[in-house]
Amino acid sequence: MKSDFSKKFSKPVFKKDVPDDTFKYLPAPKPSGKYPYHLDLEAVDPVPDQHKLAFHMVGDTGSIRTPDFQKLVVGEMEKQFEAAEKTGYEPQFLFHLGDVVYNHGEASQYQRQFFEPYKKYPGPIFAIPGNHDSDINPESPVRYNSLDAFKAVFCDTERRTVAFSGNAERKSMVQPNVYWTLLTPLANIIGLYSNVTKFGAVADEQRQWLIHELKRADSERPHKAVILCLHHSAYSADINHGSSMPMIELLEGVFEETGIYPDIVFSGHVHNYQRFSRHYKSGQNGGRVLPFIVAGSGGYDELHPVAYTSDYRFKSDLPEFDGVNLEHSCDTKHGFLKVLLERNADGITLTVEFYTLPHERRVEAGVNAALEDRFAMKI
């Protein structure tokens, strides 16, 4: 059932009276590769058609209580790989938006929350860390540092069996850092690391790296799209988190400073689906519309509802939200994204599809994923 927009917010919200947890900030681990932290998709899994590229995207898949919803989501993504009629639109890989493992990024949780559910997923899996991946369990009998397990799984120096995977067939990935750029024939996919805190935090070193990567990616336009990913959602209308002022200040500040904007921004953290449009009304960027997509309903069993306008805990009348509109949301079902890039003589078309799952733990044989939202834009 779709959200009733007449009663729920149609703009981002800010949650009032939120405790300050910036003391939780943890330093990022050392990179496993060389600056500027690039990984070429062709080196991992060559792209068969240089004019088409499709991939899955999802966030917040782990769960400490039940993996049932995650398994349903993964199963439906697998079916899109296995489609009998090959069209060139089949996804090639999964880009994970963070929170692979709850609650404290422990190595002991990866087999149950990642390797087992994804054992039949046919493609490579890339990821940026979420706040839960980055946390440390103070009661753990085994001492470890922030992102130790994440790095072993996703930021290895060579592809090999992960020691705590239960001898899974899926090997470690060779991302050069916890923030990094995936180079593809049709897009540069820039992935940020936004740390442990509830609303995210990015150190100045990474901010400077982001500026560098936006400038480099911009130099390859219009031949390639520019996609920006981070775990913490800048804009959200949900009741659990609301919008992140630190991420708004980071992104909008960098965009204004450089004059360079990505073509689209993806995030997780919030356990639902939301599609915002950010309208820039003045200056050289007047008329620009930038989509911000929240895709954090990948499996964690608790979903986050969009706030009702009557809820006194939230406000939306802030200058930071001027020109930002919630175009579509789904807060009652788990789901995943399929992103398609296609190049022709007129440039690149970027299409985003959001698929939902029946909200029961048992589903019938065949394809159960339903297309909930779809939009396309010319790059």
Image (spheres, helix red, strand yellow):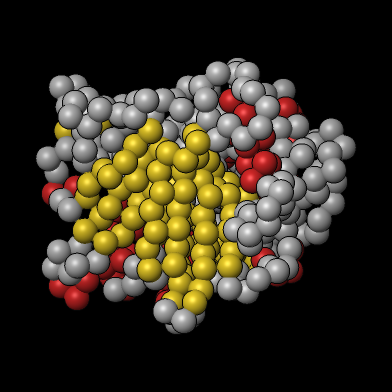
**Residue 218 position within the rendered picture, expressed as x and y whole percent measured from the top left:** 42, 77
User: At 84% from the left edge and 51% from the top edge, which residue is drawn?
Assistant: 160
Query: As displayed, is residue 59 above or below residue 175?
Result: above
Which residue is nearer to you in this view: 153 or 328?
A: 328
The reply, left or right, for residue 103 in relation to residue 115 is left
Q: Where's the N terminus, which quadrant?
A: top left
The reply, left or right, for residue 165 in relation to residue 335 is right
Q: Can residue 53 be seen in the rendering of this structure?
A: yes
**Residue 197 position within the rendered picture, expressed as x and y whole percent measured from the top left:** 43, 38
The reply, left or right, for residue 312 in relation to residue 224 is left
The reply, left or right, for residue 312 in relation to residue 20 is left
Res. 111 image quadrant: top right
How many numbered discs?
Answer: 0
Which residue is nearer to you in this view: 22 or 330?
A: 330
User: At 42% from the left edge and 79% from the top edge, which residue is drawn?
Assistant: 346
**Residue 254 position within the rendered picture, expressed as x and y whole percent measured from the top left:** 33, 65
Res. 281 image quadrant: bottom left
Query: As displayed, is residue 248 above or below residue 204?
Result: above
Q: Residue furthest front?
A: 85
Which residue is nearer to you in this view: 144 or 280?
A: 280
**Residue 57 position within the rendered picture, expressed as x and y whole percent measured from the top left:** 54, 48
Q: Residue furthest right?
A: 167
User: At 38% from the left edge and 33% from the top edge, which residue is drawn?
Assistant: 330
Res. 149 image quadrant: top right
User: At 58% from the left edge and 49% from the top edge, which residue is drawn?
Assistant: 56
